[in-house]
Image (tube, grey):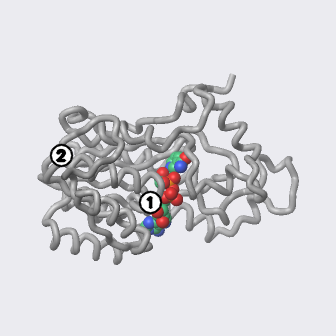
């Protein structure tokens, strides 16, 4: 029995080993399930074993193959332990998806512009909180790539997919650390794609537009649960006039993973955004 999950099309990933960081999150969890539905053995990596295990149990009970592994993606020693464990258990890695990341609430600047006033400004945001956000999103992508891509050299269909953001193209207000980190993720994706181009490892990124998940909840909703003013701006800035549905991110990932479809595609940052990145707002 093959694990059944709602995917837009099937690609054959049987015999492939895939590791998804943030594999218990909104996007990472969905990508883990989609890869398993295509026959891959999926390593679901997160900081919380129980939450990773929930994704794994669902896949395994449905007839797929998955294991959970805990690590903080910003911790080099922890990632080196992950490398050893993957090497011992599977002997290789074919697919790496870096889906751990997100906004760090304490690094958010409350106002869009200084002229908006208010007590807390950009100048009051603690440097260590901005560093935390840079670390989670940039170091947390760069480090798994550095540590794990050696296991991918010479493997069939080897590819990395990073998760960038609309804030990589033009920074979003209130989240300077996140925006700087995600532009770094896009830039690093291009760099690593070039570096590994003749080694057989393709490196690409998906840049999601706006999807409602845990990591951006605080920016999208007021404390009383009503939609924030930011939501209206997002909808107005998205030509398709709506948020994306998470499942709409699956096709881009499956396309990039499948070497028959995307074997000559490396170094791209593929927006899945309802037209947001194409629209100047005027
Ligand atoms: N949801 C959106 O609209 C959107 C848009 C653009 C980009 N993204 C990006 O997509 C990625 C996934 O986000 P999501 O929306 O699924 O958020 P999410 O909060 O649902 O998932 C993020 C996952 O990363 C894990 N994580 C956080 N810090 C970690 C660490 N140090 N080590 C290991 N795991 C860690 C979390 O536990 C969680 O499982 C992020 O990089 C995010 O920035 C999301």
Q: Is residue 106 left or right of residue 98?
A: right
Residue 101 appears in the picture as rendered: no
Which tag, 1 or 2, sits closer to the chain's start? 1
Residue beneath disc 1: 100
x, y (%) of residue 46?
40, 68
- Residue count near mark 2 (Cα–Cα under 10 Å), binned few <14, some 14–19, many ≥20: many
Q: At 54% across and 57% down in the image, what residue appears?
A: 102
Q: Is residue 137 above or below residue 179?
A: below
User: SS at mark 2?
Assistant: loop
Kindly indicate the quadrant of the structure image that contains residue 281. top right
User: SS at mark 1?
Assistant: loop
x, y (%) of residue 7?
34, 40
Q: Residue 157 bears which disc, if any?
A: 2
Q: CA distance from mark 1 to mark 2?
A: 22 Å
Pick the quarter of the image with the C terminus: top right
Residue 45 appears in the picture as rendered: yes
Q: Is residue 240 left or right of residue 223?
A: left
Q: At 62% across and 29% down in the image, what residue appears?
A: 241
Q: Could you tell me if the residues under marks 1 and 2 are in contact, i.e. CB atoms within 8 Å?
A: no
On whether ligand 1 comes within 8 Å of the CB at mark 1, the answer is yes
Q: Residue furthest top?
A: 282
Q: Nearer the viewer, residue 129 or 71?
A: 71
Q: Is residue 170 left or right of residue 138?
A: right
x, y (%) of residue 190?
36, 43
- Residue count near mark 1 (Cα–Cα under 10 Å), binned few <14, some 14–19, many ≥20: many
């Amino acid at each position: 029995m093959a694990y059944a999950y709602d995917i837009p099309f099937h690609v054959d990933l049987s015999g492939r080993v895939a590791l998804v960081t943030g594999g218990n999150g909104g996007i990472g969890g969905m990508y883990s399930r989609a890869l398993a539905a295509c026959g891959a053995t999926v390593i679901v990596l997160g900081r919380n074993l129980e939450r990773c295990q929930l994704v794994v149990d669902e896949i395994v009970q449905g007839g797929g193959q998955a294991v959970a592994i805990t690590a903080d993606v910003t911790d080099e020693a922890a990632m080196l332990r992950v490398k050893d464990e993957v090497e011992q258990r599977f002997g290789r890695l074919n697919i790496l998806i870096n889906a751990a990341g997100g906004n760090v609430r304490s690094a958010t600047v409350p106002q869009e512009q200084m002229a908006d006033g208010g007590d807390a400004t950009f100048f009051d945001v603690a440097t260590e909180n901005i560093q935390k956000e840079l670390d989670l999103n940039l170091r947390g992508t760069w480090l798994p790539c550095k540590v794990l891509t050696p296991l991918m050299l010479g493997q069939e269909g080897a590819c990395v997919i990073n998760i960038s953001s609309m804030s990589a193209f033009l920074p979003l207000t209130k989240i300077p650390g996140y925006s700087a980190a995600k532009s770094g993720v896009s830039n690093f994706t291009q760099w690593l794609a070039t570096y590994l181009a003749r080694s057989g490892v393709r490196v690409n990124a998906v840049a999601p537009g706006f999807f409602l998940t845990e990591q951006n909840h605080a920016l999208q909703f007021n404390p009383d649960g009503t939609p924030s003013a930011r939501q209206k701006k997002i909808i107005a800035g998205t030509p398709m006039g709506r948020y994306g549905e998470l499942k709409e991110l699956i096709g881009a990932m499956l396309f990039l993973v499948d070497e028959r479809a995307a074997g000559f595609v490396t170094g791209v940052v593929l927006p899945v955004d309802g037209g947001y990145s194409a629209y100047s707002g005027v």
